[in-house]
Image: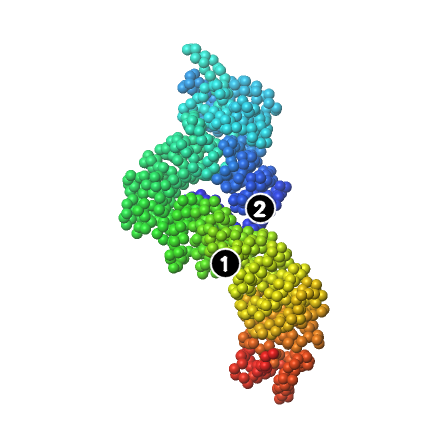
Amino acid sequence: MILRRPMSGQLFGHTNNVPESLWMICLKHIVSNDIPFKNVCLPQEICNNLLEAFRHQNANTVDTERVSRFISQFKAETSPISEARLADLPITDQDLYYILSEHTNTLKYLDIDNCRELSDSALLYIRYLPTRINSNNLDKLVVTVRVFEQRNKDTHNILLDKRYEKGVITSNLGMCEATYVGVKNNFITIFDEMGVFEYGFDTLRRKLSKMADGRSLIRKYATTSTTTSTLPNGNLFSSSSPSSFEKSDLMECLVRPLGKSATEPLVSGYDSPVFEDSDIIRDHVRSDKDGQDIVRYLDYKAWCKSPLETLIIGKCNQIFPDSEPDLVTIAEKKQHLLNPYLPLQTLVIHEVNPSGNQRYLDTLITPMMNETLTYLDLSNCNSIGDGQAFTSLKNLKVLILYNCPLSPAALRKIAQLKTLRSLDISSSNERHGHCFKSPDAQLAELVTALPNLTHLDISGTNLAGERADTIIGLSSRYDRPFEFLGLYNTQCDASFRARIPAVKVAGESTEDQILTACEVYMDRIEPLRKALNDLFHCFRIESEFHAINRSLNVVLTAMARHLNEKQIQIAASASLFYIVKSDEAKNYSPQVKRPIVTRLLDAMQRYKHDNVMLRNGSLTLIHFKLPQDVLFEYTRMVEILLLIVMNDDDDFIQRLGIYLLNSLACHVDGEQKTLVGDLGAIDKLITLIEARLSRRVCDEVMEIAWSTMWNVTDENPINCQRFLDNHGMDLFVKCMSTFPEPPELLRNMMGLLGNVAECEDLRPRLMRPEYIVRFSELLWSESDGIEVSYNAAGILSHIVSDGPEVWNQFLGSVDRDNVLFRMKTAIGRWTINSKRNINYRSFEPILRLLKSKNPVYEAQYWAVWALANLTRVYCSKYCQLLIDDGGVETLRGLLNDTQMPFHVKQLVDLTLYQVDKWKVFGHLDGLEESSEIEIGGTLVVYCGMHRLMNVMMRWINGLTHSILADITNIKIIYVFDSILLLLLSNNSRDVENYSLIDQNPHFPSVDGTKIIPGSAKL
């Protein structure tokens, strides 16, 4: 059983609309946005959760100044704190001083694990501030007095031994008597009630009487050092800052009782009448018959009871003194490193006692802990001696000695702790773990001696004995299995044995054992790293893995908790790859996906120069829906991917990076596209292309780099200008000359230039004869279907739409009419149902070509062809987009243009017809496979008669402007006559409920209904 602080994944990972989750979201919002609450009175629960949220939100990135600013908002009188979870934060001595001094009366839980900014002064604050007397905690005051006489160094006689607490005085001499005297507020009254002055000490009485109104109760000595004066009004320090304390003051406070002069002898021995950290008043009484002085002492200690029950120092071991002589002195004087009056129930200290001092443990465990302590974790402490200090812990239930060297004597002392329920003597150090000479016997003796033991961890040791079917040392527990048994990485692979007397086992033989090991050893770097590697091999080798969600929680927690451990990040991300591509992950909600993305980006950002980490992260991110699943981390992900793209060390990782970057650039709005440009994407991508161009390499990376720029320039004039400013057109010309064939490259380059051409202010920069010649030549390109030709026509359409005046200004040497003819001819060659590799978020640039007051019909021809093609082949997306962008009204307005050529108006009608049909049926089944462009060949069922008549009248009108009028009129008359015959024969029925019967069995049907045979293509 390991005490574990909650992780961000557990605190915020599972968010939904239940009140608890919304509560956590609110806390996270307050912390993330530095919302001040100095003047707001906050309940303790909110204060505790705010501190916890702050730690999880900022543990790896927050600076010292922000920590101090945040902590300073908690005022004891308005916002009391009972739990200070400060682990991993860069808190300073000043911050800790503030927390302890402000919240003395409420603080129950203090966690400073891994707070590396703290110094040895922090130990002094922990030692004295929680029990300091002040005017707000007089109801918790405790005063102990002891009067004794001493004739020589070794002989003393106790005259008075009493204790005052909550208005009750208890005598500890003879028969214990208790007398209620009421709550007092000064020492004179308390000493009088306790009978101190009956034994003299007139000097003390006079001294106390001189203090203002006798209010000496809230007046204490800070230290006996001559550099620190007596301080009034309950202030332990000489100023609001703890800076006046030096390391020498710390040692002096720890070694010598307060109030005792440095030149006076110290009464020593375990039976000493002197209280630890007490004030001693000396009063010479008389000489005995032998002439020896009889000295009377008043030894008193006053403190306020502290509510602090849990103290987690963890790896913040720099606050402890590291001088061997100092430690020896403290141990010899029976003093303690921690406050002897703290009623601690939980104590966690890691990695102390580097010198291996056998008596170090004696300086940590105070007499009060003998009564109160139930949980003790001394992981990685270099020596615990013979374990004698453990034997006095009467109520200890949990003892953790991970990686602590254990002697046989210490093991026998541990066996005396009959109250133990959980014992951890595991190890990741073979020198410590494999040192047991008689493992079977020693384990059996230990287990038999501890009848209440429910959790036992012997991972990494040889206590499980040699290879056998069972664990011999645990034979006595087969009829009473442990709730948990740690067997991970034991000698001789104990976790693979047939009979294991435990409900839950940490081992390496099964999926469940490995996950249990990960969960139990989450705070232990080495075993966790090994367990995560085992977990990865489980995913890689086993065809079915059953605990996907449990594994996800394990992996995310490990990544969040150990960001600075590269091997853990690599092992966890490798397993995360298999988790994300599993069938279970397909149903993950956004709330589950978000922490996965965040943890991956944390690791990739932290280890941005490690190819293995970048590979794992990129491969995992590919399985998300991009960009939808990562929009909340969009900026950070783009930054990381740009770093990857510029990394030439690993071609595979670079391909992954450019692919992900391109995916992010798709399907996002203009603001995010601009952000990509702001982060330097255009400049970096051009640099990347130039590098490949210099090596004459045209590969997938180069093609996707152009595709990415195509995406980020879509309807984004800022990024289009960035492309031009970075000599993008020169790069285009060079690529065209060097690599004239690759269809993907040509399509992507032309698509990008199409975006530039849509920007009116930038078009003049494209109006150079050498560019126009290239665009005109590409009109005949059959590369990548019609894409290159289509994009070339689109670029030219926007350029010619500016009119002949602008053309002549910039392109006087180029025959405009010839370009227009080539455009019309090229467009006429395209098949209307051509599949496309293009994505429009808006039709606004196309519709602008149709709204011109001085239309260029070749440009409009390209525009309406694009609309007709897209609404037919991808009707579900583009019909609605055309409606939303007001395109239907624009197209209808074009029908009034009597000068419009027939081939343009024909496509206008076709587009309107396709949109109408889609609105009725919701699809164009069969039609998208047809290459027909005349409505007569694709007329739909249920088309209203009034709509049909309007179509035909406009059609006939348009035929007068076509050289094919005679031929087409014949077909129109045929269709029109067929309709009239149908109407005449069914005049009693609703015309709109009839379909037109197609007698041609080879023509595709639409919605299962027959259609009229098609007319000839234009």
Element type at marker 1?
A: loop
Q: State whether residue 163 is above or below residue 718.
A: above
Residue ID for mark 1: 697
State the residue in front, 997 or 368.
Answer: 997
Tell me the tag on residue 31: 2
Question: Quadrant where the C terminus lies?
Answer: bottom right
Whether residue 971 appears in this view of the structure is: yes
Query: In the rendered structure, which amino acid carries the disc numbered 1?
Result: Val
Tell me the tag on residue 449: none
Query: In the rendered structure, which amino acid carries the disc numbered 2?
Result: Val
Q: State whether residue 490 is above or below residue 373.
A: below
Q: Tell me residue 25's x, y (percent).
A: 56, 51
Which label's residue is closer to the chain start, 2 or 1? Answer: 2
Q: Tell me residue 357's x, y (percent).
A: 39, 31
Seen at 40% across and 52% down, the residue is: 535
Question: Quadrant where the N terminus lies?
Answer: top left
Q: Tell me residue 319's x, y (percent).
A: 48, 34
Tell me, yes or no, whether the two marked residues, 2 and 1, touch with CB atoms within 8 Å: no
Whether residue 52 appears in this view of the structure is: no
Seen at 52% across and 64% down, the residue is: 742
Query: For the residues carrying marks 2 and 1, which lies nearer the camera in this image?
Result: 1
Element type at marker 2?
A: helix
Label 1 neighbour load within 10 Å: few <14, some 14-19, many 20+: some
State the residue in front, 653 or 768.
Answer: 768
Seen at 70% across and 75% down, the residue is: 899
Seen at 41% across and 27% down, the residue is: 328
Q: Quadrant of residue 64?
A: top right
